[in-house]
Each structure stands twice: as structure tokens, then as C-alpha cells.
Image (spheres, coloured by chain):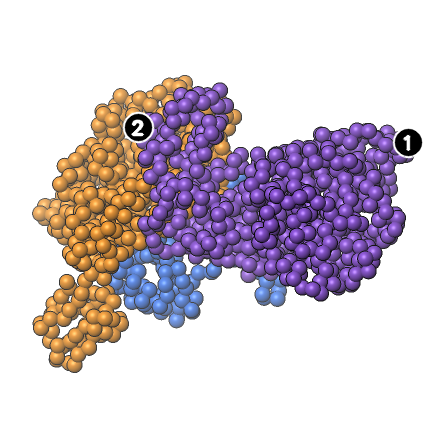
Amino acid sequence: MLNININGMDVKVEKGSTILEAANKIGLKIPTLCHIPEIQKIGACRMCLVDIEGNPKLQASCTTPVVDGMIVKTNTKKVRDTRKFVLELILSDHPTACLTCERNTRCELQTLAAELGVDIVPFRGATSSRGKDNDTLQLNYDGSKCIYCKRCETMCNEVQTVGAIFSQKRGFDSEVGTPFNLPFKDSVCTGCGQCVLNCPVGALKDNENIDEVWDAIYNPDKITVIQVAPSVRVTLGEEFGLKPGSIVTGKIFAAMRRMGFDHIFDTDFAADLTIMEEGYEFINRVKNGGTLPMITSCSPGWVNFIETFFPDLLPNLSTCKSPQQMQGAMVKTYFAEKMKLDPKKIVSISVMPCTAKKGEAKRPEMGRDGYSDVDIAITTREFAKMIRQSEIDFLNLPDEGPDDPIGISTGAGLIFGASGGVMEAALRTALEVIEGHEIKNVDYVGVRGLKLDGFKEATVSTQIDGNPVDVKVAVASGLGNARKLMEKVQAGEADYHFIEIMACPGGCIGGGGQPIPTTTEIRKQRIEGIYKGDKDMPIRKSHENPAIQVLYKEFLGEPNGHKAHELLHTHYTQQKYYENLKK
Amino acid sequence: MACECGNCIDYSVLDRIVEESRGKEGILINVLHSVQEHYGALTPDIQKRISDGLNIPLSQVYGTVTFYHFFTMVPKGKYVIKICTGTACYVRGANKLVENFVDKLGIEVGQTTNDGLFSLETVRCVGACSLAPVVTINDVDIYKRVSPKEIDGIIAGYRQKEAE
Amino acid sequence: MSLYRMHILVCAGAGCITSGCKEVSEALKKALKENNLQNEIMVLETGCMGACELGPIAVIYPEGVFYKKLKPENMAEIVEEHVVKGRVVEKYLYKTPDEKIIKKINEIEFFKRQKKIVLRNCGFIDPTKIEEYIARDGYEACAKAFEMSKSEVIDIIKKSGLRGRGGGGFPAGVKWDFTSKSEGDQKYIVCNADEGDPGAFMDRSVLEGDPHLIIEGMMIAGYAVGANQGYVYCRAEYPLAIERLNLAIKQAEKYGLLGKNILGTDFSFNMDVRIGAGAFVCGEETALIESIEGKRGEPRPRPPYPAVKGLFNKPTVINNVETWANITYIIQHGWEHFRTIGTEKNPGTKVFALAGDITNAGLVEVPMGTSLREIVFDIGGGVLGGKKFKAAQTGGPSGGCIPAEHLDIKVDFDTLKTLGTMMGSGGLIVMSEDTCMVDLAKFFMQFCVDESCGKCVPCRIGTKRMYEILEKITSGRAEMEDLNRLRILASNIKEAALCGLGQTAPNPVLSTLRYFEDEYIEHIEKKKCKTKVCKALIKYEITEKCVGCGVCKRACPVNVISGERKEMHIIDQTACIKCGMCYDKCPFDAITVE
């Protein structure tokens, strides 16, 4: 342990800690812009400068390691003046039209300007000429707002290893962008949205679809059907000031009803359906010598990633559609039939933790007879915005439930929201199906939790057709970890049967469409919320969901049967990238 | 084998450079140098091929290419005129030379004449400060203590060489 | 091996190549052959001798007769007269400003006052031959070092007080010591040959003129700190230096001086050359490391220092060319001797690249602490064209100016710092009274804006804002408050920027503000540039002296001069681009500039 004195207070920290981390320990909030705890420490924005005794110049606290006996002052006049100066410089190359900015009142730059008391920007001059991109399904880019903190770059390259964007040019013209400034849609971008999640300002944001949703609600000829993804219930509260991980399921349904949606459902139901289909697919593959390891396919950022970077592994990908798409398919077939609705009049809307879901909904193979399973996917953030636009006092709403007949769900569906959840839910079902009897233990804790670097592994012993089998599973979240795992599979070094991959660190609770900020600590709290919710559910196995049982009986027939295949399964194609570049 | 259609570019040299460099730590800049030397420019297509060959994301290759002044994405003219704008040359009037070349060639610094003959560049010190101001052409022909009056003659010399 | 009666050394440094020394050398060899002397007289093409202004140069030994400004057609005469008949050809000899003829190289003031350590082989050996380096005691220092313990070697360098010649002057031995004590299975030695400082070319001269000196210096460090791989990061603008280095590495490998088990010891060392790609910031050590790693040259925060986490995150010693060039000398002659040269806190010599408005432009090596006056006037021959000395600029874009009142300062790392400038790599640009100091500051700030990597806010945006204010001042659009803004920007950028380059970027402005504030004020308040450099503030006018010859009219590139023949002409001030062509061309001095 090292001793450091900050502003007169003694702190003990572990070797390797930075001054910033030490300061956090005693409750100091040193301002930062380019810092992502545990992920990016580059000392570029110079907001976190502090005064170290014996050092002639101020030092960035985010990168400077603590040395034993160090004496640091974080709030001297010199420190404050210098930080303010740096901020003034940033503002001299930043539009000041805050009122009309997406991030108004939630912008890190704006907050700092207020905190440091910037009342005038004393320096004026040329502004950088970074571009714009509004032509991408998942996100929008407005370079004029970029402060070149590189957080997006680090997420895209270091964490996700997608490498769609990177620093370009140099000096005043520096920017983070796609190669040759191609539109995002022509790059290797998977739409995961981790860049959006980490943008401190409004340079990167959702490609918003709120207006389309309102149009559908206001259109008397349309029937609006909405669903909400598992993880949203533990994150949406943050938009209204609640602690991360607070469960607001009931308030979500109540809000939806007040906003005027005609039918309100829970994607958790479709998550249970996914488990039925995926569980049976897995059993079939194991029993009939299908391609193993089987890999989950419910994360659309991940599907884009494997289609782009590991096309040779596409046969390993489960053919199951994601819960969003399964729900959409059921709404426009089973539900429409049952309610005698014209599926063409239905506008199927989803509230997702995810920017990539917007792209998934638009995949041409996801629908039939000229209509899509899901018409509009909006993020948690967009949904929160809609609630605010609706004059709804969210925190004081009563708890309500979803509509019948596809409203019932289980703990298994809920845990889809966290990394490891799909695997755990699948095991709960698959092992009982394989063994043909109830298994008391439903908690597979080995696959739970946030693992930022690497992947989780577990082995479950079972019997298949009387033979003992050790089912080996692996779980990775974050595309960088996924890449490592896929390279292992490619190299033949992985003898897993089943792999769960989520594109975002921590799974959907850390999705690109979740409330900002989403930090490692917040991800952990949301995960806790998910498992708490699971524990409190009366039913915790998908195959025990009575609504699912009715669905198969009335409509689908057998899991993996003909109808199920037609409606609930899909196929994948290699995504070619950067073709036809200028010679 | 090079395609015979006449439009395709023969990438065999590029592929060989990449092949020899694969697996060497931090080799990207050296590869960019060699490839540019052979092909004249690092076009998007070429960068893509390097990116695939070295297994480095194209965005990073492009980011590196655009960071360094030495790399170019468009082919340069047959004669690359470089005006040294180091301090010694500045003190001895390099700015006037730049203005004059811009005027005489009708192009800005960083551009190439329409006939593809001349590219105009400024460089940060060629290390011949005692002979300032200095102009080099294709790094081979070096003109020392250049005065604006000589510029017409210099340009005319190369034009004549071409005419012959 | 045949013995030669005479050696003729032809300087083939960059300056002389530009002046045509290759042709001179060819003509010399041809003339010797014609006289059938090719086996009697040895012609050597050497590295830079330093007197670039006088090139092409030939020195004939054993007497050391110094011929200057030679042309190919002179060589037959020199061979016939000097070589055959033994008569020195006076007309090609060096003349002092008062027309005194000087015959021998060591009698010329320019050479006489120098003390050569770094450049001791430059100009004496053929850099393409390892045998010549060995003949001048090359690779003896490493043999000597290998007989000492590693800590002894480090101790000698520490005690020598050698300070890094790349800019800040950090003690080299301390760097070595840190690196040797850092844990790591792999360590690296790096030579910073990205001499980006405009106006400095000593590193180029050493690499081109004596490449083995660098290899040997790095090897010794490799032995001392436990590194077996060295990299030289050389800027792409120096193709000859790269070629010579690669050749020297091959030769050393052939001689077993690089590779495995050097000189029978268990020490192994390999070297590679990495080429820069035109980014000034890569002269900053952490940016250079990033660049060797094949990335964008963006500086890393320090700590951790390269000695702990450097190239590929391994402990790394990084020094610049001139620093490396001192190592063998110190090992051979001992630290005690080294400390007798220079000053107490700045032992050794320093190479300066004299350029700008100076008579004897070129490379000089003098003991640390030599006065600026001696360098500029005694060695450099004073200001070109007899003009008044205004200031000397050192440290390039990170440095500042030294005005005439400080001509007697002793030049070393610390003194320069107290004057608000710095040593930098040793570029010394002399400026005459015709230089506008505001424009000079703008020139450097433009440089910093162009070369900023963009990573940190103060440098990326701050230097741009400073440049914009300077642009306002030099174009007559500034107000006095801008001067205050400029100061605020300068002092804060110094404090807040991430790397050394950003932190020193405001220096040229601060320094000119310190010594020449009146010029700034004149620009702002009177909208006047007394040196007539700032175009927006000057006006060309045709006076009554005009005879209407029409020369100016024809010279004007934008056709804004009108007037009938034999009548007074007039310049349309609204369209004049102030290029000065008319002024230059007018045969009657009828055009004034105000």
C-alpha cells in the first residue's frame, strides 16, 4: 500500500493506483473528459490536472501513478484557473447551441462549464471542420460537437476490437472517424453503440425514431403494439433519478398504457420462446452431430460482428431469431390471428437497450408478406425521452402488467438482460428436457457476473441417452472478448458445446442504447438488479411458462417444428466490407 | 500474374512487401513507405490490401497514413518541388519563394499541376541550412540560395526537358 | 597496402553535395589519372567538415591546405600546380574578411576555435568504410567497456555529467541507470535521429559522416543496461543518412561487431533502422516510441518514463544522435578528462548549426559555455552583409531569441533557460535588423499548429488560437487586449500541455514578447512593421522619380500598375498584393515602401 496526501487528507492506495483513483477514494470528484475508468487513461483532455508537490508543472491525475509519500493539491487557484482555461479552449471550438442539443442538461462538457464557472469564452477563432453522418440506421454523428476525447475510439478499438473508427489527420484537424470518412453504414461498424454510450457530448447519438412512434400512435388507422426488453426494467429508472438496478417493470407498462399504445407486451415472453427454440436446437445439435459449439444469436451487434469478421463460423450460430424478432413475429401472426387484426395495420414497436436492434429490425429476412416483424426499435434513452414528452410523472406511476395473451414471462426470460443469462436460462430448460425430470437447482452462478477481460467458462454434467456428458459452456460479453473466443474456436482450441456472446460488456444491461452514463460500476449494479428480479419471479424456467405452452399448443406445434422454423428462425450471410474503394 | 485488361493494378509487389513484414512488431510505417515508393501513392484500395495483409483495421491504417506528412493518397506529379521552410530558409525569404511558385505554377502547396508534371510542397528543413533558401526537386536536384528571379528558369528547364 | 604520398579530402556533406562536390571530386580523380597519379594520391569523400558556406571544399594532407568554393574546371589546375609541382594555388585559398590569405585549415578562425568530440571523424574519414573508422580508434571504446562491469560503465557516464543533447539536457547516465534497474526480460536502446528542429542539421552530419560512432555508442549502452536490440529512428528527409547507417550496420555485422557474442563476450546486440514519415512531434521521445511501434506519433503521458516502460512497453534508453556521439570519447578518455571540457554543470562540447543571416553558415563544435559573441562573430564571421545583429534564435520552435544585449552570455543548457530560450538540438539562427520579430513568432506558431499531433487540448486548440492572434497583429486587425490574451494562452499552454513540445510551443512568442514587446505594440497601435516584413502593414508607392519606363508595370503579377509611357505610373492600392516585384525591378529607385 502507498500513502498519499491529498488536500491535507491521508489516503492509502494500492500500488499502481492513479492520483485520480486515490482522490475518488476520499470522495473528490476531479473533473475529467477523456477518462474512462479502467479502460482509457490517455491524459489528453487536461481537465484533471492537479498540483503535485515538488513538480514544477501540473500533472494529469488520471495517468500519474501514486508514489509513496506524494503530496497533492487538487483545488488550488492555479489548478482551477488552468482547468478553466482548458475548458475555455474546448468551448472555443464547440457550438454553443446547447438548448437544441440532444445532450442538453446531460452533457459532460456543459456540466463542467457550469461547475467551473465559465461565463464567457474569451478565445474565438476557426472551428474544426469535422463532418456529419445522418445516414446510418443505428447512430448519428455530428463532428462539429466532437471534443476529440477519443473515448469512442477506445471503445470501438480496444474494447470491441471492431475498428470501425480511429483517429485521423493531426493537429487542429484531428478527428475520430471511419476510413476515408466513409458513411458508417459502409464501414465495419456493428452498430453496437458503445461509442454513443461513451460520448461525453452530443457528437454521437442514437438515430432517433421517436417521431415515427408518435406518428403511429396518433394515426387512427394503425394499431400500435409495443414490447420492452428484459434489461430496460433495471436501467430506465436511472433516467428519472433512481439508482442503477432499480426495477421499474410495473411503471414501464403503466407509462406505455398512458402514452396510448394499443397493446403492451413484454419481450421477456419472447425470451422464454427463444429458450425453447434455442434449447431444442442445442439438444438436436448435440444428439445429431450438428455443428458445435453452438453460439447464441440474440445480440444483433454480435451477429453483425461474426458476419463481418468470422464468416466461416456462421454455421455455429444458432438459427434462432432474437427475442425482439420472435416477439414481433408472434405479434403479427399468432396475436393478430387471435385478435383478428390485419397484420399490415399493426405497427410493431420495441423498447431496446440497444442501438443495433434498429438495424436488426430492418433486416429484409425478418418478416413476411411485405411486412416486418418489428417496425420501429427505440432505445431505453429514446423511450425515456418519450415518457418526458408525455407529461408522465414516471416515479409516481402505479405498477401495472402487460396485456394478455402473451404477457406472462419467467425469471429465465428476465436474465437475458445480463451476460450469462441466456446460457443460464438455456441450461435451466435444456438439462430438464435432456434428463426428463425436474432439476431443483436453477442457479448457474458460474456464468454470471461482469467479466471485462476474457470469458467465463462452466461445465455441467448431465446424461444424454443414458451416457454421461460434461456439457462445456463459455460466456463472453464485449466484442473484444468475443473475438478472442472465436479465435480459439477457429484454432480448434475450444471444445465447448455452447457459447453465449453479447456484443456489449456485461450484456444488454450495458447496451449501447442504455442510459448515460454507463460505467463499470453501474453495469454491476444493473446486473444485481437483474438477478434480484429473477429470484423474485414465481416461475424461473422458460418451459414452465404457461403462455408459452399455450402458444405451442394452439399455434406453433413443436419446438423447432415446421411453423416454428418458418417464423422464429433465420439465416446469416457474410458481410463484405470496404469493397470498391478508389484505386 | 498481372491482369491484362489494363485497368487492374498489379499488386504482386505490395503482397510481397506485406508477406515479408507480417508478424514483425510495429512494421506498418515501414510497409507504407515501401508501398508508396513503388506505387506512388497509398490509394484507398492499396490501404485496404495492406490492412487485410497485416491484419490491422483499415481505420488504423488510414489514421496512420493521414497523420504523417510523408504519405500521400494521390499520386504526385513527375517533378515534386519541395521548398524548404525551415527557420534558416524562412529567415532568408522562403515565403517569397512559396508565393512565387504558387503564382507561377497556378497551384497551391500540396497540389499537382493539371498536366501531372509538377507537385508543390513545403518541407520542414532539409538540413542544408547554410545554403538557405533551398528548393529540391525529386529530392535529387538541389537548388541553393534560390532567389525569386530564378524560379521561371527552374520551371522552364523541366518543361523543356519534357518537351524533348 | 600501398602508401600514399598525399591524401585529398573532399567534403561530401549535405551542403557540399548541394554545391556540387561530386562533380568536383570526379574532376579531381580524372585529373589525377591523367597525370598518372591515381596510385600515389588518395582521394577521400568525407562527411561534413562544417564550413558549408565555403563548399565545395578540398583539404590536401599532410600539410592541410584548404581549398574552397571549387569548381570542376579548377581541379586540373590544382593537380598540376599543387600535386605535381608542389605550388599552392592561392586563388582558391580562404581569405579573411580583411583579404588576408590563409593556407591551412587549422589556421582559419572558423576551425581554430572549435573543439571536436562529436564531429571528430566528420571530414576526416570516408564514412562508407568501416576500416577508416577503426583506423581512428573506432570500436576500441566498446572493447574497453566490455572489460568493465556494467555498473562501472554506467558510473563513468554518470560521472561524466553528459547531458542529453536533444533538448532538455537530462543527464544521460541517470537515464541509463534507471533503465538498467528497471525489471524486464527485454530492453531496448533507441537513437532519436528525427532531427526535426528546423535549422539544425548536426545529427544529419554525424549520421552521414560518421555512422559507426553512433552504433558503437548505442552498443556500449546496450551492454551497460542489458539490452540486445537497438533502433535508430531517422527522419525520412535524410535518405543518405539512412543509407549510410544501413551500410554501417551491415559492415559492423560482417566484422562481428554487431550480432551474437560481440568480441568474444557473451554480449549480443542487433540494430535496425526505422524511418520517420514527416512528423515533427516524433522527435518527442514517447511519440517516437509510438512511431517505431508503427502507430500515429502521439505522445504518451509520463510517468511512466521510457526507462521503465518504453518501446513495446519495455525499459528503453532513448538518446539523440549527438548524445550517442559522445559516449565512445568518454569511455576512451575517461570522465575526468571529459569534465575538463565545457563548464561544471555542462561538461563537454556542443555542436551548433549556424544559419540565417550569418557569414560563415555551417556546423561548429565548441566547448559548452563558449560565449554567444564568440560563436556568432569570431567563428561565424558576424552578420551577413555587415548588417546589425538583432537576435539569435535557439531551440527551434521550442526555443526563443537572444537579443544583442545578451551576446556575452556563456551558452549552455542552464543559461539559455534563464534567458527564456533553450538549447534544443543546437540550431542557432542569426537574425539581422531586417527580421520582424512578430512575424518570426508567427512563423514558429504556424509551425507548431502544423506539427501539433492534436492529442491534448492546450496544444491542439491553444496554438491555433495563438496563431490566430498573431495573424491579427501582423495584419493590423489586433487590439491591445489581444496581447493580454496571447500572454494568457502562452502561460497556460506551457502549464497544461501533455508533452514537451506542447509545453514549449509558446516559447517563441513569450521570448519575443520579453525582448521585443515594442514591436508588437507598434504593430497593434501604429499598424506599422518597421522591418517591412508584414505585408498588410506596408504600402508600395511610386514617387516622382518615376520616368515612366514601364518596367514595374510589366513586372506586376496582378496588373495593378497603370500609366502611359514616359509618364508617372501609379499603383492601385486596393488590389496590390504587396509582392514587391515592382520595388525589386525598378531601375530608378522610384518606388518606396512604407
Q: Residue furthest bottom?
A: C564
| Residues packed near mark 2 inside 10 Å, few (<14), some (14 to 19) or many (20 plus) | many
Q: Position of residue C118 (x, y in %)?
A: 29, 34
- At 23% from the left edge and 71% from the top edge, which residue is drawn? C574
Chain of the residue on which disc 2 is drawn? C
Q: Nearer the viewer, mark 2 or mark 1?
A: 1
Q: Nearer the viewer, residue C337 or C243?
A: C337
Identify whether A371 is placed above or below C151: below
**Horizontally, is A499 left or right of C152 in the view?**
right
Q: Quadrant of residue A236?
A: top right
Amino acid residing under circle 1: Gly
Q: Residue furthest right?
A: A466
According to the picture, the residue beneath numbered tag 2 turns out to be C162
Q: Nearer the viewer, residue C302 or C518?
A: C518
- At 50% from the left edge and 23% from the top edge, which residue is drawn? A14
Q: Position of residue A410 (x, y in %)?
A: 77, 40
Give the quadrant of the N terminus of chain C.
top left
Amino acid residing under circle 2: Leu
Disc 2 and disc 1 on one polypeptide chain? no
**Would residue A498 be visible to someone looking at this image?**
no
Q: Position of residue C546 (x, y in %)?
A: 11, 73
**Would residue C565 be visible to someone looking at this image?**
yes
The colour assigned to chain B within the rendered structure: blue
Query: What chain is colored orange?
Result: C
Secondary structure beneath label 1: loop
**Horizontally, is C150 left or right of C336 in the view?**
right
- CA gap between label 2 and label 1 equals 79 Å
Query: What chain is colored purple?
Result: A
Give the quadrant of the C terminus of chain C.
bottom left
According to the picture, the residue beneath numbered tag 1 turns out to be A466
